[in-house]
Amino acid sequence: MKEFSVVIAGGGSTYTPGIVMMLMDSLDRFPIRSLKLYDNNAARQEPIAKAVGLALKKLAPQVAFSYTTDPVEAFTDVDFCMAHIRSGGYPMREKDEKIPLQHGVVGQETCGPGGIAYGMRSIPDVIQLIDYMEQYSPNAWMLNYSNPASIVAEACRVLRPKAQIINICDMPVGTLRRMSYIVGKTPKDLDVRYYGLNHFGWWTSVKGKDGTDYTPQLIDYVSKNGYLTQKAIETQHMDESWQATHKKAADLLAVTPDCLPNTYLKYYLFPDYVVEHTNPNYTRANEVIDGREKKVFGAAHRIIEAGEFHGDEFEIDNHASFIVDLARAIAYNTHERMLCIVENKGAIANFDPHAMVEVPCLVGSDGPEPLCQGEIPTFQLGMMQQQVAVEKLVVQAYCEHSYQKLWQALTLSKTVPSAKVAKEILDDLIEANKDYWPELH
Ligand code: G6P
Ligand code: MN
């Protein structure tokens, strides 16, 4: 049986240990011979890598492990790159969230002006990863979580159309897990129909493999409780602010009562509510810095101090299981059905064929094959047309270094009330991002 070589780009991410644990847990179905961590921030990667190294020593000493900041070393002789980089790190996420809020606008990691700002930082960094991979391991696949996934995916389509990259998101998988609790199944028992853009979509059907239709039951449940579930064995999306987001799905559903909404739609459908309920001085970035960061890095330091991994220090989450399933689907041509962000090409029949959409795909060794979702209703179509134009304008602005197009992108975002406010936010974002963005003119 072939054994694979994997590099994780964004080695210093708080999600890296979970992916490594999942890989260790999956060795019998996805054997690996080599695991490398790569990050351009040596200081951040170091504790994670040392702790992960100790875990591997205990769990799978036969797997060659190394970590590096050198792209040649990282990308040579690999089959898969699992990427989850954060350009600018949490300090820049904090600015993405706080600057729009200063103007009374949604401040969010991937939605609205914050997501646009992050997109402008991520594009060159993800493209650089693709180029390293293509140069040093031309047959490899990149499985990419790096956000904002919709803008990143559009940039890949435009700038590296032939690259073997699959852009993905763990939100629908996380929500499907909640749905599976509601109907008393496991996520693997369920097949969905879903359409949208990343962080911007709807489930039209959730069925058991035996054909049982759970959609009406789920719609009834979500209309009362959102995606809040009693069963709380999740490790991801559990903080109080996330619970509020799961709950808010009840209000999202009221707008489109025959399909189940992605939680991220709250930023577009209820932006005023979101702003009112956000502390502009302590945003999600602060929660993560004080929460997940401390937890994961704390665990890493304890392992290093003990000089030994005990077994329960790191948790596996949806994020990890999805990306390993995806690697398996490509490696073994399984044709497992999974949501991926792909060029539409008719999958949503009445939508731009060149838009990057999130739909169910059959994933095999040639990558994802999108499944046709048919025509979508006017309301969702209108929202998606507006949002996809925002995403395309961001990529055009990046490529052309165009202030005008970026201003148009912000102006068109459903989260922003006027061209005036868009310009004010943009000017602040330009100042905050001057070390990252190309100079706009
Ligand atoms: C979900 C999304 C990711 C996003 C994350 C933020 O998992 O799919 O794209 O990065 O939420 O979670 P956080 O806990 O960092 O706010
Ligand atoms: Mn996501």
Image (spheres, grey):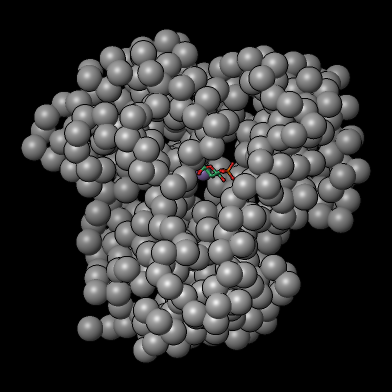
Q: Residue 83: name its quadrant.
A: bottom right
Seen in the image, is 175 located left or right of residue 92? left
Would you place residue 240 above or below residue 154 in this image? above
Pick the residue in front: 139 or 417.
417
Quadrant of the image occupied by residue 114: top right
Q: Quadrant of the N terminus?
A: bottom left
141 shown above or below 211: below
Q: Residue at x 62, y 47 (%)?
A: 291
Horizontal and vertical percent for residue 38?
Answer: 60, 74
Q: Of 61 and 438, which appears nearest the observer?
A: 61
Q: Residue furthest front?
A: 306
Q: Is residue 254 left or right of residue 89?
A: left
Q: Position of residue 206 (x, y in %)?
A: 24, 31
Residue in the image at 22% along x and 20% along y: 217
Q: In this rendering, would 28 be left or right of 390?
A: left
User: x, y (%) of residue 437?
Assistant: 81, 51
Relative to 420, residue 326 above or below: below
Q: Residue at x 18, y 43 (%)?
A: 189
Q: Is residue 403 above or below residue 214?
A: below
Count of numbered circles on the image: 0
* Residue drawn at point x = 44 percent, y = 47 percent: 235
Left of 54 or right of it: where is 61? left
Q: Nearer the viewer, residue 336 or 397?
A: 336
Choose between 298 and 8: the one closer to the eye.
298
